[in-house]
Structures are given as C-alpha cells and as structure tokens.
Image (cartoon, helix red, strand yellow):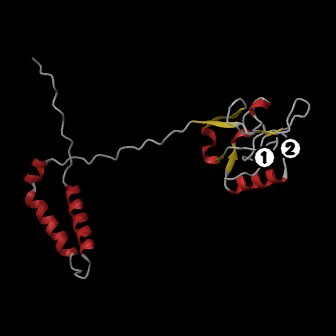
Amino acid sequence: MGDWNAKVGEGREDKTVGPFGLGERNERGDRFVEFCKENDACIMNTFFKLPNRRLYTWTSPLHNSSHVVRNQIDYIAINSRYRNSVRSAKTYPSGDINSDHNVLVAEIRLRFKVERKSKRNEKIDLNDLIKNKEKISKILEKKLETNIEDRDENIEHKWEHIKSNIQEVMGTVKKQRLKKKHWMTDE
C-alpha cells in the first residue's frame, strides 16, 4: 500500500480503528483512516490490548536511554469482512531485520466455505422405461411436432428445445430409487 508514516493513535473510530493504538494521531494518520473507511478496511493492530513493547513499530535512530522516540507507524489493514479472522496483530522488537522498524505479525485463521455436492440425479428404472417405450415415444413425438414449427431458429436453440422436451417427458416417467439388497442372508 505504501509508506504513509501515519500515526493513527489511540481511540476507537467506527469499525475502522480499534481502541488500543499508540500515541497521538497526525495528519497522515487522518488520511490513512479515511483511506481505510473508503475501502471498508480495519486497522487490525489497534484492536488488541497489548503492552506498549508489542505496539510500537518504529524506533528513532536518535533513540537512547534519555531520549525515547518510538511510534506505531506500520499497520495491518484488512477488509472488514475478514476482521473476525484475525486472532492477533503484534510486533516483535527483538526480530533481527537490520532496520529501525520492528517485525509486525498477524495471526489469521481462515475458514473456507465447504462446497456442497450437487444433488444426484435420481435413477430411472430402465425396466419401467422399456415397458412404457411406446407411450413415451408417442408423447415425445407429439411435443416435438407441435414445438418444432419455427424453422428459423439456430441449431443451438433447437437442441436446447429438444433436450428440454426429452427431460420433461422423462420427468413424467416414475422415478425410483433402487433398493439395496440386504448383504447378510437369513441362514
């Protein structure tokens, strides 16, 4: 997203900023919060109550024991739809990354939607189909004669029409599930 050097600060703001930020907000922080609102994002490392050492993301090169300069200027912004998936967001100041910034890590747990299997087509009893062969043929023939009068249609339309008529006629045939035979005998 970019290097905003934004300080969001502490204090809750809508669903975008949590109550546990660090420090005071600056002008770039205002712009970053507006950007997140416009894009329906949440600044996740402001939603977890942690000690300050787990909040600051940057330490000034001028930092020493008498002059402490630490800020929270790096953030994890996530679409608000996935906000509840984030379990934690914190820094690791001891991470050796050769930078004045600290490692910022989020633990995210995603749950994927399980695709449900489509309904199986019910099986048609073939014996019943053979017994009613003539009846089915006549019904289908009548449907096709009355409906294929329009000769100007393209081949795809004709095929879809024939297919739907066949499916409609087949739907009138009694559908049965084949009973499973009991695998254990009475003997």
Q: Residue 162 location, x and y as percent?
A: 21, 68
Residue behind mark 1 = 13
Residue located 21% across and 79% down the image: 149
Tag 1, which secondary structure? Answer: loop
Tell which residue pokes out farthest to the bottom in this image. 152
Image quadrant containing the C terminus: top left
Residue located 64% across and 42% down the image: 83
- Residue 169 marker: none
In this rendering, is residue 100 above or below 153?
Answer: above
Residue behind mark 2 = 24
In this rendering, is residue 48 above or below 170?
Answer: above
Q: Residues within 10 Å of mark 2 (few under 14, many from 20)?
A: few
Q: Label 2 is placed on what type of residue?
A: Glu
Tell which residue pokes out farthest to the right in this image. 66
Q: Quadrant of residue 136?
A: bottom left
Q: Quadrant of residue 49?
A: top right
Q: Pick whichever of labels 2 and 1 is earlier in the sequence.
A: 1
